[in-house]
Image (cartoon, rainbow, N blue to C red):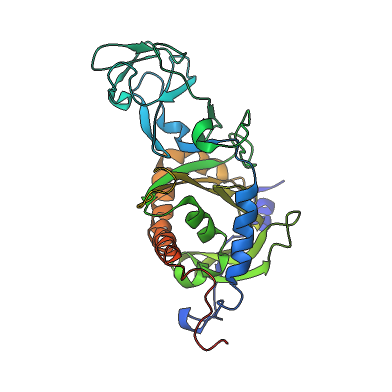
Amino acid sequence: MTRGADKARWTSPLRVRRGPGWAAQTPTWQQAKPALIDEALERAEARPSGNWFVVGASRDVVAGKGPRGGTVGGVEVVWWRTEGGELRAGPGACPHLGAPLRDSRVVCGALVCHWHGLALDGSAFAGWDPYPVQDDGVLVWVRLDEFGGEEPLERPVVPARPPPGSGVDAVFTAVGQCEPRDVVANRLDPWHGSWFHPYSFVDLRVVRTPRGELDDAFAVDVSFRVAGRLVVPVRAEFTAPEPRTVVMRITEGEGATSVVETHATPLTPRGDASPRTAVVEAVVAASERRGFALARAAAPLLRPLMRQAAGRLWRDDLAYAERRWSLRGTGRFPGRRPPGTG
């Protein structure tokens, strides 16, 4: 095929938007029924997680470097890589005198406590018992059976993604004062997109809502704002494969098969008066366009921009989730009818 024929076939993903401004768009509050969102949330919470929790990005755990650490449900957890790149995880407190192992060093693949030199190779030793851990290629998952309280699964429920090596992935993390269900509920309310995030989404229209367990997806037509009136229209689906995960998958349009995974990990124990939840969002962008190979080559430069875009959205969406949590505690949210609706 000639270069001229190639150019003739090429079409730009960009469109010029000529729709109404923010205040003139069609209100969505009547479609965004609290009961519909709650029912989708309840179905998500009834699905098994196998006690697996997302704790961070795979790329952040580097062989030969120091460990990573944090809390899940008030449980201290530490994780690191051996010299061969295998993940290890376990309690974050040294079994000797309780030193924070996240501040220790990895020497020849073993985690060496910086207080008294106790070395842990990832197997049970001196009262320290490892946790199951999985690297899915983008995220790190740790299984906490005692805290999770479910029937354990051998592997986490990882959403389908573009084939390995075909996309560009980036992981963003933020923390809010709310519970995981508030984060999930935010994502199961697609109607707020054009109203709450007009800098990113316009012309959002929900074209399908869940009909039950066997057909449990929200489908939306939406345009991603690029700059000014330039937009990229797509169709996307929102699903919740397990209690703490919501997946947005582009099904039609530019970047089909790309996914945005939102994982909500509780940092504090159940029933905490001031719960804190980590939002760990993985974006895996893909495209069939030949030029996308350049994007893969430029991935190290693109990832900070992808994280910046996710951070702008989550600045607002965490405010939504935190507000939901604070009102939920008063019994005034969700489901209260607006004034004048009978």
Query: What is the quadrant of residue 156 in the picture?
Result: top right
In the rendered image of this protein, does residue 50 appear above or below residue 87?
below
Q: Is residue 129 left or right of residue 15?
A: left
| Quarter occupied by the C terminus | bottom right
Observer-nearest of 13 and 186: 186
Position of residue 97 measured from the top left corner of the image (x, y, whole percent): 27, 19
Q: How many numbered marks are there?
A: 0
Residue at 33% in and 20% down:
94
Position of residue 252 measured from the top left corner of the image (x, y, whole percent): 68, 58
Residue at 39% in and 43% down:
268
Q: In this view, which residue lies farthest toward the right? A: 214
In the rendered image of this protein, does residue 115 appear above or below residue 174?
above
In the rendered image of this protein, does residue 159 appear above or below residue 35?
above
In the rendered image of this protein, does residue 314 appear above or below residue 23?
above
Observer-nearest of 140 and 129: 129
Observer-nearest of 187 and 335: 335
Position of residue 101 measured from the top left corner of the image (x, y, whole percent): 32, 23
Query: What is the quadrant of residue 250 in the picture?
Result: bottom right
Observer-nearest of 235 and 129: 129
Position of residue 138 measured from the top left corner of the image (x, y, whole percent): 52, 36
* Residue 143 can be seen, yes or no: no
Q: Is residue 288 left or right of residue 293?
A: right
* Residue 20 can be seen, yes or no: yes
